[in-house]
Image (cartoon, coloured by chain):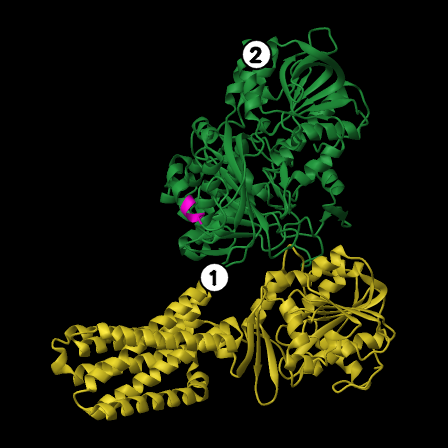
Amino acid sequence: MTIALYASLFMVATCGLIYELVAGTIASYLLGDTVTQFSLVIGVYLTSLGLGAWLSRFVQRGVARRFVEAEIAVAFLGGLSAPILFLAFSAPRYFPPVFFSVVVAIGTLVGLEIPLMLRLLKHAVAFNELVAQVLTFDYLGALLASVLFPLFFVPKLGLVRTSIVFGLLNAAVAFASIRLFRDRIGAARGLVVKASIVTVILLAGFILADRLTNFAEEAQYADEVVMARTSAYQRIVLTKNRAGFQLFLNGHLQFSSVDEYRYHEALVHPAFALRPRAERIAVLGGGDGLAVREILKHPSVKSITLIDLDPAMTEMARRHPLVSRLNAGSLLSPKVTVVNDDAMQWLEKGTGLFDLVFVDFPDPNNFALGKLYTTRFYSILKSRLDPEGVFAVQSTSPLFARRSFWIINETIKAAGFQTRPYHVSVPSFGEWGYVLASPAPIPVPTRLALSLRSISTTTLPSLFDFGPDMSPLPSPVNRLDNQVLVRTYESEWKKYD
Amino acid sequence: MKPSRRDALVALAGLPALVALGGAAARCGKKPARGLAFEGEIVGGSSALGHRLRTGELLARPVVRRERVSTAILGAGVSGLSAAWTLSRAGDDDFKLFELESEAGGNARSGRNAASQYPWGAHYVPVPVAPNRALETLLEQAGALVGRRPDGRPQWSETALCAEPQERLFFRGTWSEGLFPRAAASADELAQLARFEQQMRRFAAGRDETGRRLFTLPSRLSSVDPSVTGLDRISMHDWLLKNQFTAPHLRWFVEYGCRDDFGSSLKQTSAWAGIHYFAARLPGTAAREGIGEAGTHDDPDEPAPFLTWPEGNARLVSELARAAAGRIVANALVFDIEPREEGRRVLTLRYLDAARDEVVAVEAEAVVFALPKFMARGLIASWREAPPKFLEAFEYVPWLVANLTLTGRPLERGYPLSWDNVIYDSSSLGYVVATHQGGADRGPTVLTYYRPFAGEDARAARRKLESATWSEMALAALADLSTAHRDLPGLVSRIDVYRWGHAMARPAPGFFLSADRVAAGRSFRGVHFAHTDLSGLPLFEEAQDSGVRAAEAILTERARPFTSLLQT
């Protein structure tokens, strides 16, 4: 009997710590700022444990029954904590109150358990031994939880299933306790029914976990999240693995430090090959500063204006040690002016011409982004481009989203430009496409001014050849009043998701 | 259609309950004097001034000043402004517009605040599917028509064409694209919808013996073949039944069109007008050409796209009003018209200059009466004693329009915020978003909420509307929209309301064919009539056409050379 009790104690301790880790992880995933979130969770959780311990004094009779009830409640609330918190995040305004209520409730219930357990065991074991053993198992459980949580449970099961599995373990403890203390509990029918209902709910949750969350993030970030924050415009997440680190915006990979040079060299240098003496440069989007890093390699450049909507993004590019090392502090260069504004509105209300413009927006996966790929946008851009100027647009994958790519090319042509579409291979993304465009006739570039890692003067013209599986398709023009690109893009990528 | 529980709630009769509900919803945030988290006011609608007509006291007031003008235009709405625009184009600039309100625009007026410009009424024009010289000329002047293709068809400005996403419907807790609740429709309902659309396409493609479209804009160019106009004898409700269109969602969809354009229920709308709403917007011609040629919309089976502006049709009003700059007399209550006597060249009218509280007499050679017909009885001297019977044929629907200024965007579920946002279970038409065309996806915006009093007795609804207070109307609008946006009360900083007591004439069954309608359009001793109520279709195209026609009739009378803008 004692062994079974210690086993239960061990499980209770493990589960308790797991819920704390789940809450802390979710808070730092969703709210960013890991240090603050974790210390807040630990503080609130420990206080709640104390509250639970204090409340235990009010349990006078029926200790065993109360213990089982607390166990069932922990199983339910702890087990469902991750799904509840993920769902709560869909209404961000209500997330903090829901979050702390859940943490306090679980902490209080777990805090109740240990004193109740001590009281249940006090007849069986001498007091000093009892305290020593209870605390030993408590800390051992904590050790096991803290080791297994990051190494095994999160990578294998994900947060939602982890919390449900431990809820089920709590439920198992409840069943075991009902059996162990059957003589002290008396009529156990009600407890068995309650524990069974909770078990069924948790099992259902386990099976439906994927649908419950549909929270891409959880499954997506296989690697360690080193920074996560939600800005006014998007969710910014940095993850890290052995090879390097990655930036995600709203769950979409923006770059991997391993191969981003291929992407950014291809975005920037072909345009410079056409206009090697370009002085006035604009970058639209590209708040990570990586395109600017490449642009700064050209000595002719006198000024670079970077227009990115999100100050959180450009601030991260300037200050975050990983990112600013990768972009070589590009955004701190005296040649660079950073403007946080809507690129379309900024271009429209401003004056002054640019020799080269680099358009590095996220893929057109919603109407707001789709606008930045319309004839209207390119017409406005034309009014800010030198008559001999050139711009380069990142244009999604000509392989995965073949028609989308050619729609972008067609749209730029419809706005009165000559275009030269090209592509390059970026392992993290696959085959990636760009369009070079100018109001003036432009040849396929043939000479690079700099030596690069991924492109040489010899390979440069080959970027402009498209194999049969990427060759042009008859494509409509993307306009504000049809947004045909967003619809096409969505249907094309659906095949790969 | 069976009224839902929410209909009953939002009907103004249930206002006290809503005040309580809205008050609870609006608790958060700062609280100005009235205990609500937002401010606002009743805008325009100088009905108090208008009501002075009824007492007749003005007729006894002495004339302080006398003026002379060759054409006096009464009403600076789209009809009156179009008459002025036409005269000005012909170089006949000796005209004045007399407007009761403080500014021109009529049903196409607009407002403006720090968040955006916004419409107070009419807010779009469909791209004309058949040649319409007057409209195309104006749209070119407004920068919406940017060029022509080799075959002569117009090309439209990308900024004036309604941007995507255009329309969405809130149905069973979520937003989806378009205005038909496809997800909830049974196979039979979808089949009925397809059959209905097919039928409308046939109406659009059909031509009568004289080669006319069966349904077109302006409506006077529609076929007069009895097989077409005969549809006016029955209601849209009966026509749907007769053609076995029984699916509830389809009937909702068709009624939405009737409420949208006419402020009328299916039973209150003539089948001719109801079909006109759908068929006159379908090109029904032109072969399919290469996909997506810039500025073209070639699919003959797709409804014409909309042209719209942040301030709605006030953009077109401002173009028309430029032709009348300096000749618009605002706050002018015309209360008496003495039509031309036999053998005389001039007629006389009197108006109250409300700013100075002075009565002014105007001698004019011609008058364009661009006011709703219900005012004619009080204004035209000989009609005060013996009103012609045809005036009784006109019935006017009241509307409530509210502009809700938001500090930010509501949280969304499903299809994203669109230009036109419709709530299935609402007696309103939903709302349009003023910042949509400008492309601002975030931050403050203005939602324009439209609530026609369809399906009720117009007179009773008007009384209810006139006795409602600002907070009652504002809360009714807020409560209605909050069913689809639960966080709306926390985002609203202002709600301004406009009550249109006589927003539009109703195309009731039999109205279009009636002799009364024809009689009401005939010029009367120097008074030319121009208004959408003459066709019963309260649309920009009708208003403009009626104004242009009145002006061209005057120009013809004067034997002045001009190039006609009228299509025949």
A324, above or below B322, in the image: below
Q: Which residue is mark 1?
A: A93
* Mark 1 crowdedness (10 Å alpha carbons): few <14, some 14-19, many ≥20: few
> Which residues are the magenta region?
B23-27
The amino acid on which the numbered mark 2 sits, given as a three-letter code, is: Glu
* Residue A397 appears in the figure: no
What secondary structure do most residues of the magenta stretch adopt? Answer: helix
Towards the viewer: B258 or A231: A231
B306, above or below B98, in the image: below
Q: Secondary structure at mark 2?
A: helix
Q: Secondary structure at mark 1?
A: helix
Left or right: where B186 falls relative to A252: left
Can you tell which quarter of the image residue A344 is in?
Answer: bottom right
Residue B24 in percent (x, y) is at 40, 47
Image quadrant in which the N terminus of chain B is located: top left
Towards the viewer: B54 or B382: B54
Q: So how many labels did they put on this image?
A: 2
What is the spatial separation of the Cα atoms under label 1 and label 2, in whole angstroms?
59 Å
Residue B376 in percent (x, y) is at 58, 18
Q: Residue at x 45, y 77 (%)?
A: A24
Taking the magenta stretch, the answer to whether it contains residue B482 is no
Which numbered mark, 1 or 2, is in the foreground of this view? 1
The amino acid on which the numbered mark 1 sits, given as a three-letter code, is: Arg
> The chain coloured green carries which letter?
B
> The chain coloured yellow carries which letter?
A
Q: Which residue is mark 2?
A: B57
Towards the viewer: B316 or A83: A83
* Mark 2 crowdedness (10 Å alpha carbons): few <14, some 14-19, many ≥20: few
Taking the magenta stretch, the answer to whether it contains residue B26 is yes
Q: Residue at x 58, y 70 (%)?
A: A492
Left or right: where A214 falls relative to B145: left
